[in-house]
């Protein structure tokens, strides 16, 4: 036994049938078939999807807390923390706003709601009321107060509010940085806990195919593929706009940063299929953190950019909000002036911040936006309620890809991107995730 000449080793590729993305793809296909041919059975499988999402939510708070704390503490200087945060939020604000603008432009050009001539008074708004009630809580004052948890421990213990976990983790990480070497013993414990949590993540991900099957079977069984036909114009426009945003806008950003967006999508294919199957980008959050680190992004940058991006960098949700708002206005024959559309844009910029990456969050955020913009009837949301679930999948996929791109870009800006490891990951041969550990291999 001799030490390897290089501590970095290529990870072995498992057989195709053991690869997560293959298993999830098969599960999604089975879910569609069950939901279509046996809809009652498909609806009955909903608990499988709900249980898997609950399993993932169980570990999201500790994953975010440990990743951010150890990442920030590893920066050694508070100025470095502020620099990374400033770059990340500058990126988030720029591209979130651009996504809103893209939704407005496409909505005005294609006008998917034109000609429907629907009277808002004839719509059944019973199901919309629940979303309106949740939306009323999204005032700016309530939003700011909601960031601060009751106690230091409750944010992580409850785990229901990502923003509270972010708030506590960032403050705690800064505190560890300020006390210097005295933090070393605690950092060792936190680092060990982080390894244990990610081992748990890998274990729980084995249940992903079951969760994806249950969620997809329920969606198709409950709403039916035929539900898409009623509003196919809006759904198709949204999917096309999101695809163009990813390939053109984010693709251009990726090219400037020195990588190919399609290669990144291929690298994250298992996570993307999981997001597709569950309609929740949160389901793949722990895996995204682990895979970004494995791809050579500095741990401190990943720990700050990924969790905050899940609350502040929601490209898919932003495209959806302005496009859906214009669709409702067009369908109900409401003529929005340029001033009205600019107001819609400004309100959406605020209301979209802090939206969670879970199913239904985009619909709640849209309700909050329309409640403040009186020109567009909130009752019109009943028009898109039936197909929102289908658009939720595209929202989540776009949000997920946007945050992956942001992580790589900010890492490159910070000179915290290991290009050798990144190129290997993009080529489909990711290197071992522990480059800092000396490995011993047989002769």
Image (tube, rainbow, N blue to C red):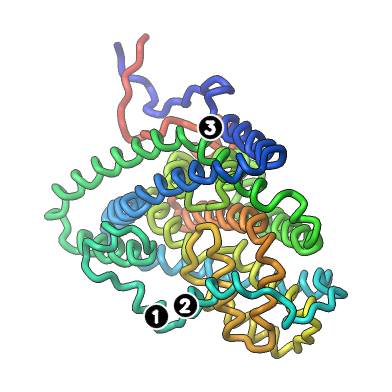
Disc 2 and disc 3: Cα gap in Å?
37 Å
Residue at the image point whose x is 69% and y is 88% from the top: 375
428 or 324: which is nearer to us?
324
Query: Which residue lies at the image location 58% right of the left edge and 52% below the top edge?
Result: 401
Q: Quadrant of the N terminus?
A: top left
Left or right of 127: which side holds 175? left
Q: Is residue 329 left or right of residue 355?
A: right
How many residues crowd around disc 3 within 10 Å: few (fewer than 14), some, or many (20 or more)? many
Q: Nearer the viewer, mark 2 or mark 3?
A: 2
The first of marks 2 and 3 along the sequence is: 3
According to the picture, the residue beneath numbered tag 3 turns out to be 20
- For marks 3 and 1, the one nearer the N-term is 3
Can residue 418 be seen from the camera position used here?
A: no
Cα–Cα gap, marks 1 and 2: 6 Å
How busy is the neighbourhood of tag 1: few (under 14 within 10 Å), some, or many (20 plus)? few
Query: Pointer 2: what residue?
Result: 138
- Badge 1 is on which residue? 142
Secondary structure of the residue carrying numbered label 2: loop
Callout 1 touching callout 2 (CB < 8 Å): yes
């Amino acid at each position: 036994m001799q030490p390897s000449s290089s501590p970095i080793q290529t990870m072995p590729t498992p057989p195709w049938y053991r690869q997560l993305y293959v298993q999830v793809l098969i599960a999604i296909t089975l879910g569609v078939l069950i939901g279509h041919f046996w809809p009652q059975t498909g609806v009955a499988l909903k608990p499988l999807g709900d249980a898997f999402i609950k399993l993932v939510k169980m570990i999201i708070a500790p994953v975010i807390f440990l990743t951010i704390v150890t990442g920030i503490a590893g920066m050694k200087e508070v100025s470095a923390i502020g620099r990374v945060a400033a770059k990340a939020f500058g990126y988030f604000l720029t591209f979130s706003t651009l996504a809103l603008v893209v939704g407005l432009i496409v909505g005005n050009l294609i006008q998917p709601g034109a000609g429907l001539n629907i009277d808002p008074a004839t719509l059944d708004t019973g199901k919309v009321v629940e979303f309106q009630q949740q939306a009323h809580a999204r005032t700016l004052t309530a939003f700011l107060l909601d960031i601060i948890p009751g106690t230091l421990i409750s944010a992580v213990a409850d785990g229901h509010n990502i923003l509270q976990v972010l708030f506590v983790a960032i403050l705690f990480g800064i505190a560890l940085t300020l006390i210097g070497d005295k933090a070393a013993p605690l950092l060792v414990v936190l680092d060990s806990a982080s390894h244990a949590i990610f081992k748990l993540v890998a274990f729980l991900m084995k249940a992903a195919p079951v969760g994806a099957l249950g969620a997809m079977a329920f969606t198709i069984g409950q709403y039916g593929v035929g539900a898409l036909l009623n509003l196919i114009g809006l759904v198709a426009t949204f999917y096309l706009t999101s695809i163009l945003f990813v390939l053109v806008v984010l693709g251009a950003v990726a090219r400037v940063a020195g990588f190919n967006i399609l290669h990144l999508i291929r690298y994250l294919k298992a996570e993307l299929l999981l997001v597709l199957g569950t309609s929740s980008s949160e389901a793949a959050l722990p895996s995204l953190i682990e895979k970004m680190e494995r791809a050579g992004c500095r741990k401190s940058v990943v720990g700050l950019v990924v969790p905050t991006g899940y609350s502040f960098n929601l490209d898919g949700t932003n495209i959806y909000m302005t496009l859906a708002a214009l669709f409702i206005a067009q369908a109900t024959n409401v003529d929005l002036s340029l001033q009205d559309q600019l107001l819609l844009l400004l309100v959406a910029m605020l209301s979209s911040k802090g939206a969670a990456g879970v199913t239904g969050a985009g619909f709640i955020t849209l309700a909050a936006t329309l409640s403040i913009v009186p020109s567009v009837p909130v009752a019109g949301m009943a028009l898109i309620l039936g197909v929102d679930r289908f658009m939720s999948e595209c929202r989540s996929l776009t949000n997920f890809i946007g945050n992956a791109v942001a992580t790589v870009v900010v890492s490159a800006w910070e000179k915290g991107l290991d290009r050798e490891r990144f190129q290997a990951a993009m080529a489909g041969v990711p290197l071992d995730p522990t480059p800092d550990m000396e490995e011993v291999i047989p002769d």
